[in-house]
Image (cartoon, rainbow, N blue to C red):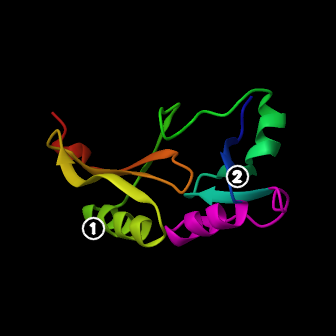
């Protein structure tokens, strides 16, 4: 059965997108997948790989047109943080790296603290610190 998962995203500029994700704390996944048309980025400690593909190459792989991220969202990627402070740090790193925080760090539902942002290509991300001991 399934052992790993890869998230595949189209990007305008592979190098700029790669550098953005490294600047916010993700890691380059050394080895296969890194070329002029793609970059492999490791998210977290569970071997989730974010594959960044140049847009035209992505269209060939996907077999259809791209979503216009300035007008709509196809998905919201969420990942966890270890503390409220880490949420704030990631939000600051996103802005410094050229992304857009569209939901500033804040508490939610009494047990979560998070923010949401767009990467350089308009893909939407959500980072959350969840304190399950406060969950009702």
Mark identifier at residue 52: 2
Residue 39, position as x, y percentages in the image: 74, 59
- Left or right position of 37 against 10: right
**Which stretch did the figure color magenta?**
14-37
Residue 32 part of the magenta segment: yes
Write the residue at 53% across / 30% down. Answer: 74
Residue 34, position as x, y percentages in the image: 81, 62
Residue 9 part of the magenta segment: no
- Left or right position of 26 against 131: right
Whether residues under marks 1 and 2 lie with C-beta atoms below 8 angstroms apart, the answer is no
Residue 131, position as x, y percentages in the image: 24, 49
- Left or right position of 96 against 87: right
What kind of element bears circle 2?
strand
Q: Which residue is mark 1?
A: 85
Residue 56, position as x, y percentages in the image: 79, 43
27 or 54, which is in the foreground? Answer: 54
114 or 118, which is in the foreground? Answer: 118
Q: Is residue 102 above or below residue 86?
A: above
Quadrant of the rendering where the C terminus is positioned: top left
Write the residue at 57% across / 63% down. Answer: 21
Q: Nearer the viewer, mark 1 or mark 2?
A: 2
**What separation in Å lies between label 1 and label 2 (alpha carbons)?**
28 Å
Write the residue at 40% across / 67% down. Answer: 95
Write the residue at 66% across / 59% down. Answer: 41
- Left or right position of 135 against 12: left
26 or 93, which is in the foreground? Answer: 93
What kind of element bears circle 1?
helix
């Amino acid at each position: 059965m399934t052992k790993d998962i890869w998230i595949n995203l189209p990007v305008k500029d592979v190098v700029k997108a790669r550098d953005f994700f490294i600047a916010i704390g993700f890691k380059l996944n050394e080895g296969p997948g890194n070329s002029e048309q793609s970059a492999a980025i490791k998210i977290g400690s569970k071997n989730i790989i974010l594959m960044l593909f140049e847009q035209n190459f992505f269209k060939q792989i996907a077999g259809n047109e791209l979503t216009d991220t300035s007008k709509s969202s196809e998905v919201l990627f969420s990942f966890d943080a270890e503390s409220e402070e880490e949420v704030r740090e990631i939000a600051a790193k996103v802005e410094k790296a050229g992304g857009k925080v569209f939901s500033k760090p804040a508490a939610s539902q009494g047990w979560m603290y998070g923010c949401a942002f767009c990467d350089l290509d308009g893909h939407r991300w959500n980072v959350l610190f969840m304190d399950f001991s406060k969950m009702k």
